[in-house]
Image (tube, helix red, strand yellow):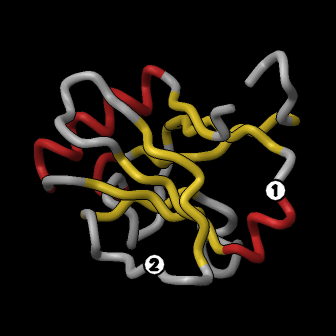
Amino acid sequence: MDRIALTPAAAELIRKLRADHGPLMFHQSGGCCDGSAPMCYPLGEFRTGGSDVLLGELVVDGVEEPVGFWMSASQFELWAHTHLTVDVVPGRGSGFSLEAPEGVRFLIRSRLLNDTAG
């Protein structure tokens, strides 16, 4: 059962960011300085380890490799029963996330995870 998905607008932005920056990855921020936001980085720029969980790999048409989506294990415990959808909205994102200069920001939409909706 999939835990993570993309809206068409997020997929389009990922294609642009991939063209500009190479392979990408996401890490879901824990809510400190940037709120609870999905942060997009060049692949490997954010170091993951044993305290992180790979929720899934996002497959985007026109992008060679899937985009991994990670979050800390402690945060995953709180979100274990949710399905997350990465979306994009107008506004200033974090200075650390690749979309910040684009005038938009990634955000997460969530719903309860269930057997019928995936």
Is the Cβ of the residue at disc 2 closer than 8 Å to that at disc 1?
no
At 50% across and 64% down in the image, what residue appears?
27
The quarter holding residue 36 reads bottom right
Does residue 107 appear left or right of residue 39 in this picture? right
Precedes in sequence: disc 2 or disc 1: 2
Residue at image mark 1:
79
* 3D distance between C-alphas at marks 2 and 1: 18 Å
Foreground of the two, 75 or 33: 75
Q: Amino acid at mark 2?
A: Thr
Q: Quadrant of the N terminus?
A: top right
The crowd level at tag 1 (other Cα within 10 Å; few <14, some 14-19, many 20+) is: some
Tell me the SS state at disc 1. helix
At 27% across and 22% down in the image, what residue appears?
61
Q: Quadrant of the C terminus?
A: top right
The quarter holding residue 83 reads top right
Relative height, residue 58 to residue 77 (above, below):
above
At 36% across and 58% down in the image, what residue appears?
25
Q: Amino acid at mark 1?
A: Trp
Foreground of the two, 70 or 107: 70
Does residue 78 appear left or right of residue 99 in this picture? right
The quarter holding residue 77 reads bottom right
Relative height, residue 15 to residue 102 (above, below):
above
Tell me the SS state at disc 2. loop
At 39% across and 81% down in the image, what residue appears?
47
What x and y, as percent, mark residue 95? 39, 71
What x and y, as percent, mark residue 33? 62, 80
Relative height, residue 49 to residue 22 (above, below):
below
What x and y, as percent, mark residue 89? 53, 36
The crowd level at tag 2 (other Cα within 10 Å; few <14, some 14-19, many 20+) is: some
What x and y, as percent, mark residue 96? 39, 72
Residue at image mark 2:
48
